[in-house]
C-alpha cells in the first residue's frame, strides 16, 4: 500500500523512516531549533530556539536525518557555521537526529528582510495589527528593504537549499516555514522545477481587503512566491479559506480556483491549499516536564504562591499576545472581587522578543509599569499580586504550565498558540484554560476551555473569576477532555499529513517526471 494511503493513526516513526530512506528532507525557517550564545565565563552554549515553529518541527523531525536551514542570529551562530564540517551541526551534537545549517546574510540585508519587511510589515498585516490611520507608511526605505533585504535573503535561502539538494541523489522534499520565506519557492522552482515544495504559514492569513493594503508590486511577488509551492498549508480551515478568497479576488496574479478540490491553478501548475492543525509531541513534553530542573522551578513557583490559587501566562513579549489587556483584566478582577485578594497570584513567565524594535521595547515598558501599578494598588507585606519574570527560560515555563489553576491565553490573533496545548498536556492541578476565540487552537479546543474575546477586559475578568471559582468536578472534567483533545493530535501527525499530501502530488505528477538517471544529471546542472 502506498504511504499516502496508510491510516494516519497506524503509521509509526519506523514506517516514516523507511518511506524517507530515498528522500532528502529540507526544512527552512528564519528561526532554527538552536541558537548559540556566549555565557558568563566565555563558553559558547546552545539554547533551544523559541516559538511554535521550533516546538513542532524539532520534535517531528527526530530520526529523519533531515537538514534544517535557518538564519544565523548571533555572532556565535556564524562562528559555529564556519567551524562545522560542510557547515552542518548535528542535533543533538553527540547523537545527531537531524542537522542544522546556518544561512548567513549580510547585516544590512538581514535588517531589511527581518525587521523592516517580515516583522514591521508582513507580521502586522497577517495579525490585523496595523494602526492604519498612522502606520505603515510605505516609502522609499520600505521598497529598498524589500528589494535589498527581503528579496535577497529569500534568494540566499533558495541558493543554500539548492546547494544541499545538489549533493544528494535522493528525492528532495522541501518544507518552507512562515512569512519570512514567501519568495523562496519561486527562486527554487526556476532552477529545480520538479522538486516537491511545501510552504506552511504559522501565522493567520488575512482577508482580501487587508491584503490589498500591501502595494501591488510586493503583493504580486508575494503571491507568485507562495504559488510556486506544490502545497500551501495553514493551521486552520479559516486561514486556508482566506487564502483562497485572496486568490479569487486578488488583482496581483491571474489564477483559477477550484473550490471543490481547494486548489489554485497558476502558471500551468496546480497548487493545493490545505490546513494542518499543528500540535505538540506530548510524550516528549511529559518527559521533559518530569526533569529535575523543571521540578526545582515548580518548587520555586509553589513557594511564591503558597496556598493561593495560581493564574499563569506563558508568552513572548509580543504585541499580538495581548499581555497588557490580560493584566488590565486581572486588575479589573481584583477590583470586582475583593474576596480574592491575597488568595490568588498572577505569575507571568515571559520571553523577551524583538527588542531591537522600538514598538516592542515600548510594549515591554508598558507591561512592567502596569505590573508595578497592580502590585502597589493591591499588594501588601505578605502578598505580591502579580509576579513578572522576563527571561528566556523553557524549564521555568514548563513548571508554570504544570502548576496553574487557570491559564490565560488571550492573543488578539494567533496562528495556533501551542502554549494552550502544552498546558493541557502537562498541567497537574486540573487547571482551566481561558482561550481567545482568535487563537488558532480555539476551534480544536473550544469545548474544553473558557472562551474569551481578547479585546473585552471586563469579560476576561469575569472568566478569571469563573475559572478560579469553578467546582472541582467541573475543573477535572474540562482538564481531562482538554488533554484528550490535544493528545489525539501530535506534531508527528502534523508532519505526516503534509508528507502524505506531498506523496499524492508526487504520484499525480509521476507520468511526467524525469527518469531517475536523468534527474541526477539535472541536479548536476543546478
Image (tube, rainbow, N blue to C red):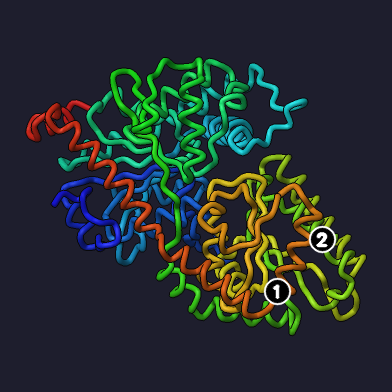
Question: Callout 2: helix, strand or loop?
Answer: helix
> 10 Å neighbourhood of mark 2: few (<14), some, or many (≥20)?
many
**In the image: residue 370, left or right of residue 506:** right
Which callout, 2 or 1, points to the residue nearer the camera?
1
Residue 392 picture location, percent across and down: 60, 60
Question: Callout 1: helix, strand or loop?
Answer: loop
**In the image: residue 431, left or right of residue 221:** right
Q: Could you say which disc has been placed on residue 470 in the image? A: 1
Question: Which of these two is toward me, 16 or 393?
Answer: 16
**In the image: residue 475, left or right of residue 440:** right
Q: From the viewer's perspective, is residue 87 above or below residue 232?
A: below
Q: Is residue 65 visible?
A: yes
Q: Could you say which disc has been placed on residue 4 in the image? A: none
Q: Quadrant of residue 198?
A: top left
Q: From the viewer's perspective, is residue 240 above or below residue 340?
A: above
Q: From the viewer's perspective, is residue 143 above or below residue 126?
A: above
Tell me the quadrant of the picture where the C terminus can be found: top left
Q: From the viewer's perspective, is residue 136 above or below residue 331?
A: above
Residue 20 picture location, percent across and down: 21, 51
Q: Residue at x 83, y 73 (%)?
A: 384
Residue marked by disc 2: 371
Q: Residue at x 89, y 71 (%)?
A: 338
Q: Residue at x 78, y 58 (%)?
A: 327
Question: Which of these two is toward me, 111 or 465?
Answer: 465
Question: Which of these two is toward me, 364 or 515?
Answer: 515
Residue 464 picture location, percent across and down: 74, 65
Amino acid at each position: 500500500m502506498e504511504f499516502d494511503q496508510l491510516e494516519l493513526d497506524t503509521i509509526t516513526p519506523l514506517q516514516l523512516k523507511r518511506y524517507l530512506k530515498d528522500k532528502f528532507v529540507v526544512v527552512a525557517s528564519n528561526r532554527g531549533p538552536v541558537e548559540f550564545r556566549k555565557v558568563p565565563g566565555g563558553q559558547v552554549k546552545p539554547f533551544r530556539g523559541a516559538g511554535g515553529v521550533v516546538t513542532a518541527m524539532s520534535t517531528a523531525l527526530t530520526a529523519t536525518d533531515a537538514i534544517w536551514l535557518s538564519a544565523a542570529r548571533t555572532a556565535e551562530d556564524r562562528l559555529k557555521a564556519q567551524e562545522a564540517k560542510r557547515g552542518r551541526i548535528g542535533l543533538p551534537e553527540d547523537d545527531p537526529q537531524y542537522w542544522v545549517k546556518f544561512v548567513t546574510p549580510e547585516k544590512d540585508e538581514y535588517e531589511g528582510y527581518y525587521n523592516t519587511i517580515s516583522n514591521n510589515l508582513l507580521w502586522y498585516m497577517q495579525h490585523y495589527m496595523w494602526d492604519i490611520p498612522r502606520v505603515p507608511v510605505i516609502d522609499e526605505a520600505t521598497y529598498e528593504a524589500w528589494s535589498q533585504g527581503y528579496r535577497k535573503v529569500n534568494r540566499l535561502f533558495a541558493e543554500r537549499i539548492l546547494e544541499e539538494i545538489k549533493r544528494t541523489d535522493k528525492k528532495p522534499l522541501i518544507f518552507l516555514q512562515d512569512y519570512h520565506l514567501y519568495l523562496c519557492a519561486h527562486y527554487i522552482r526556476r532552477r529545480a522545477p520538479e522538486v516537491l515544495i511545501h510552504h506552511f504559514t504559522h501565522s493567520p492569513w488575512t482577508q482580501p481587503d487587508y491584503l490589498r493594503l500591501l502595494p501591488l508590486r510586493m503583493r504580486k511577488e508575494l503571491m507568485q512566491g507562495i504559488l510556486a509551492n506544490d502545497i500551501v498549508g495553514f493551521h486552520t480551515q479559516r486561514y486556508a479559506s482566506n487564502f483562497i478568497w485572496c486568490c479569487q479576488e486578488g488583482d496581483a496574479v491571474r489564477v483559477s480556483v477550484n473550490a471543490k478540490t481547494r486548489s489554485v491553478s497558476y502558471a500551468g501548475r496546480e497548487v493545493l491549499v490545505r490546513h494542518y492543525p499543528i500540535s505538540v509531541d506530548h510524550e516528549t513534553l511529559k518527559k521533559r516536564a518530569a526533569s529535575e530542573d523543571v521540578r526545582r522551578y515548580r518548587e520555586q513557583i509553589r513557594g511564591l504562591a503558597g496556598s493561593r490559587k495560581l493564574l499563569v501566562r506563558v508568552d513572548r513579549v509580543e504585541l499580538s499576545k495581548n499581555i497588557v489587556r490580560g493584566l488590565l483584566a486581572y486588575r479589573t478582577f481584583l477590583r470586582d472581587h475583593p474576596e480574592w485578594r491575597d488568595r490568588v497570584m498572577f505569575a507571568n513567565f515571559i520571553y523577551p522578543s524583538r527588542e531591537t524594535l522600538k514598538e516592542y521595547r515600548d510594549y515591554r515598558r508598558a507591561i512592567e509599569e502596569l505590573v508595578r501599578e497592580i502590585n502597589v494598588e493591591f499588594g501588601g507585606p505578605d502578598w505580591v499580586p502579580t509576579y513578572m519574570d522576563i527571561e528566556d527560560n523553557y524549564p521555568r515555563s514548563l513548571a508554570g504550565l504544570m502548576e496553574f489553576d487557570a491559564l490565560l491565553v488571550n492573543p488578539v490573533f494567533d496562528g495556533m498558540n501551542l502554549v494552550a496545548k502544552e498546558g493541557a498536556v502537562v498541567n497537574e492541578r486540573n487547571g482551566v484554560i481561558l482561550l481567545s476565540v482568535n487563537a488558532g487552537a480555539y476551534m480544536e479546543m473550544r469545548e474544553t476551555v473558557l472562551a474569551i474575546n481578547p479585546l473585552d477586559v471586563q469579560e476576561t475578568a469575569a472568566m478569571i473569576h469563573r475559572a478560579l471559582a469553578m467546582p472541582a468536578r467541573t475543573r477535572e472534567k474540562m482538564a481531562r477532555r482538554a488533554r484528550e483533545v490535544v493528545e489525539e493530535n501530535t506534531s508527528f501527525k502534523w508532519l505526516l499529513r503534509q508528507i502524505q499530501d506531498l506523496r499524492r502530488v508526487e504520484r499525480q505528477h509521476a507520468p511526467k517526471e524525469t527518469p531517475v538517471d536523468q534527474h541526477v544529471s539535472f541536479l548536476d546542472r543546478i
